[in-house]
Image (cartoon, helix red, strand yellow):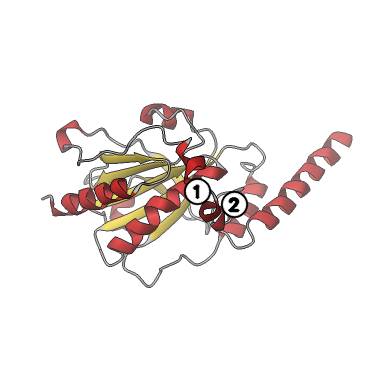
Amino acid sequence: MLRVNRVINQTRASISTLQHLLNHEQKLFPFPPQHFARKSSNRFFDIYKIAIANKILIPAMAARKFPAVDVIYSDGRKLKLPVIFNGNGGDADKLAVPKASLVCLSFRANSQGMVDSWSKPFYETFSESKNVQIYEVSFIDSWLLCLNPIKRLLLRFMRKSIDGEKDILQKHIVYSFGDHYYFRKELKILNLLTGYIFLLDKFGRVRWQGFGLAKQEELSSLLSCTTLLLEEK
């Protein structure tokens, strides 16, 4: 009985924390408000700049495949990323297969500001494109938050209207629960404190990659590479 009460108390504490942190957010617990990124100095984020982003589009023949990952929307809809053209049905039949997908990965709270530094300018640039999609994937590996009752409660807190839903380009905010070791291993992701940005083509190949907080020249590279990718046959 004492053990049960302890678990209940821990669960209540977690729910209380979630309510406080997710008041006006649709991001992964315990992501801070977006103004955190604005108040934080670039020097702080530079600690997590593990590499410079690609300057040119990776040739299709040399590009590696992005590993499959199961994600879930806040309303309970499920999806397998990447959404690709392969002629085998599945998610590709239900969704329009984009020519270019920006996939942003966050494993810890502090990386959300880094992801925003890439996704917001990208969204503003391609908001009228029918051939581009943005996926922000937040990974949740806490055993408590992965329990089905807590998981459902967490997703309910996340459920809000998507910003920019009047635009053609949709930003998909999705979550992946559970262990992600093998997924990270395929992408050679070791540092969980930084953000990872991938530009994928319609076959799910990684054609460009960035890390950490976006710099102006890196943003220019991302936007130009996306334009080139959209022009590919």
Question: Residue drawn 50% across and 48% down?
Answer: 112
Where residue 137 appears, x then y in whole percent?
45, 47
In the image, residue 95 sits, relative to residue 3, either above or below, namely below
Closest to the observer: 28 or 3?
28
Amino acid type of the residue tagged 1 in the rendering: Gln
Where residue 179 appears, x then y in whole percent?
53, 33
Mark 1 and 2 residues: CB-CB less than 8 Å, in contact? yes
Asked if one can make out residue 84 in the rendered structure from this viewpoint, the answer is: no
Question: Residue drawn 25% across and 45% down?
Answer: 88
Count of residue discs: 2
Q: Which residue is mark 1?
A: 112
Q: Which residue is mark 2?
A: 32
- Residue 138 falls left or right of residue 207: right
Closest to the observer: 61 or 220?
220
Amino acid type of the residue tagged 2 in the rendering: Pro
Where residue 232 appears, x then y in whole percent?
13, 50
Question: Residue drawn 57% across and 37% down?
Answer: 141
Where residue 106 appears, x then y in whole percent?
48, 43
In the image, residue 61 sits, relative to residue 9, either above or below, namely above
Asked if one can make out residue 202 in the rendered structure from this viewpoint, the answer is: yes
